[in-house]
Image (spheres, helix red, strand yellow):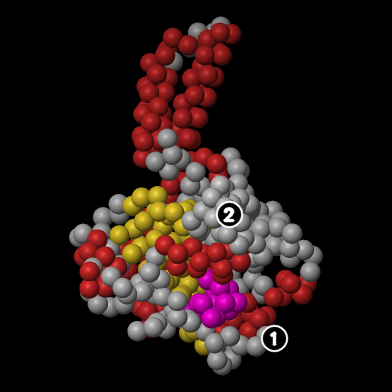
Amino acid sequence: MGLTSQSLLTVLVLTAAAATIATLWLWPRAARRRPLAWVARVALLAVTQASVIAVLLVLANNTYGFYSTWNELLGHTSSRQTLRPGADGGKRPPALVVKGQESIGLKGTREKAGQVDRIEIRGPVSGLGMDGYAYLPPQYFRKEHAKDTFPVVVAITGQPGVSKNLITQLKIPQAASAAVMDGRIRPTIYLLVRPSVVADRDTNCTDVPGGPQALTFFNQDLPLAVSERYRADGAPGSWGAVGNSTGGYCALKLAMTNPARYGAAAGLSADYFARQDGGTGDLYGGSKAYRNENDLTWRLEHLPSPPVSLLVSTSKKGEENYEPTLRFAAAAKPPARVDKLVRDEGGHNFQTWREEYPLVLRWLDKELRTRS
């Protein structure tokens, strides 16, 4: 029974209801002034409270996406540090495996509305891996487009978070499908992933010295895996990235460090440096120089400007990154370009980002370069 499954929530709700009814029914019998009765009352209260709290915790996890599996909750890593060759003389396993399709209520058949695949990515370069989703546009399945390739946008959720938030909370496949069907954007493949490739560590899309090579995973493994499995455009700058919060930092970082692949990126309520805390550990090996390299504003101020288009969003009221966003945009110099999406009021939450995404998808569509 999955941690985010409806069946688990149903079982917990029924358990809480049964515990509450049992407590109300048995309480008069346990009201006597005897040690055993006192123990019974404590037990009844403990079971009832525990069952109600379990329901609330699961509801909160399903809403905000802190953990997607029991392994993540228990701190068991899902990363793959080594990939051993098979018994057929060294052929490596597929870098991307399609595990099925996700039903999200797109309006029409896959030839009309597109399809969402559940995927698993196994990085042959970094040795890391993760689960995620891929939205394929309807043209991908039509005979007249059977030889076409498609631009790719990597969408990255915040931290902590799970990739399914991009479907259930931000509704990216739904927005992309509607925009493609209406002709507002080109047919595009969307990869929906989380920023951390290690279940028990927030890696901030950083190649950690002596640790997980998270940036390598996004810059090398993910494009390799997608291109092996899907008809992805390989033209320079034909990939884009977008993310919220920590995912926004990652998206901007991908374009700034790998402009030959990622021609455009959007950071919604983004950080501009990788925060270090108890969940990240030391990301820089104690090196100030390496810390600076991972500071996006510092990169714009001190390194050669990358030929990319960037979009950053913030709010004058309700966001902590308003001033850092203005400093980041002011540091840009050609050939880099930074556009700003500034709201009068907004929060660091799904509602704000969900309202911004349709505009951001159109911006990315305009900025991405393709073969055609």
Q: Is residue 37 above or below residue 174?
A: above
Q: Tell me: 304 left or right of 362.
A: right
Instruction: Determine the image quadrant of residue 197.
Output: bottom right
- Tag of residue 362: none
- The furthest residue to the bottom: 334
Q: Residues within 10 Å of mark 1 (few under 14, many from 20)?
A: few
Residue matched to label 2: 90
Instruction: Determine the image quadrant of residue 302.
Output: bottom right
Q: Tell me: 291 left or right of 201.
A: right
Q: Amino acid at mark 2?
A: Gly
The reply to whether the magenta stretch includes residue 252 is: yes
Residue at x 54% of width, y 50% of height: 88
Q: Amino acid at mark 1?
A: His
As helix, strand or loop, the secondary structure at mark 2 comes to loop
Residue matched to label 1: 302
Residue at x 73% of width, y 63% of height: 209
Tell me, yes or no, whether the two marked residues, 2 and 1, touch with CB atoms within 8 Å.
no
